[in-house]
Image (cartoon, helix red, strand yellow):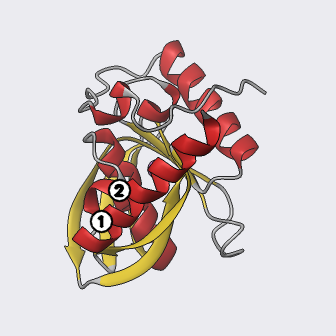
Amino acid sequence: MSVSKIEVYPAAVLKRVASEVTEINGATQTLITNMVDTMKSAGGVGLAAPQVNVSKRVIVMEFSHYDERMQGLIVMINPEIVYAEGGMYQEEGCLSVPDFRAAIERSALVYARGIDGQGKIVEIEGRGIVAICLQHEIDHLNGVLFIDRLSEGQSSFFRKAKKIRKIKTT
Ligand code: NI
């Protein structure tokens, strides 16, 4: 297992737009293995490369805890949302924003395309947790965290929550 430290808000790498992967090489494979190990060890459903301090467009996802029909790992390099429709609110969290969860507005159905670790095209159509995760992880590649999508009221709650936490730790 090669587990990395997960970058936590407000780390600068989480606000950066990640760069496209132009070649799948040994470094890409090492990054993918490391991301998968880190995601599993943290008990997450998805992870984006900036969360392990690598500003590259790579995401990994694993949904088998949620839906046993969705066994196996999904690796997407340079993922893009090709099509999205509808809307939903569902609570989500992020390994880079510990101890905070909130319901965010997301598209209900997402169709995404990318390249897997072997250089093959991967296409995923997902609803529910899959749609949320695709949008959440692709947001990470654009320097966007779910807390950037909070409503005004949620946002002030988040600021207060952070303040209380800071007071407790100093
Ligand atoms: Ni996240």
Which type of secondary structure does the marked residue at label 2 adopt? helix
Q: In which quarter of the view is residue 126 placed?
A: bottom left
Which type of secondary structure does the marked residue at label 1 adopt? loop
- Give the spatial CA distance, label 1 vs label 2: 5 Å
Q: Is mark 1 within 8 Å of ligand 1?
A: no
Q: Label 1: few (<14), some or many (≥20) within 10 Å?
A: some
Q: Residue furthest top?
A: 26
Kindly identify the residue that appears in the image at 39 percent across and 65 percent down: 157
Mark 1: amino acid: Leu
Pick the front one: 166 or 53: 166
Mark 2: amino acid: Ile
Q: Residue furthest right?
A: 1
Residue 64 visible in rendering: yes
Mark 1 vs 2: CB contact within 8 A: yes
Residue 123 visible in rendering: no
Pick the front one: 83 or 142: 142
The residue to which callout 1 is attached is 150
Pick the front one: 150 or 44: 150
Q: Label 2: few (<14), some or many (≥20) within 10 Å?
A: many
Percent position (x, y) of residue 57?
34, 34
Vertical arrangement, residue 77 with respect to residue 129, above or below: above
In the shown orientation, is residue 2 left or right of residue 159?
A: right
| Quadrant where the image shows the C terminus | top right
Pick the front one: 70 or 120: 70
The residue to which callout 2 is attached is 147
Percent position (x, y) of residue 101?
51, 65
Percent position (x, y) of residue 63?
62, 64
Kindly identify the residue that appears in the image at 35 percent across and 20 percent down: 23
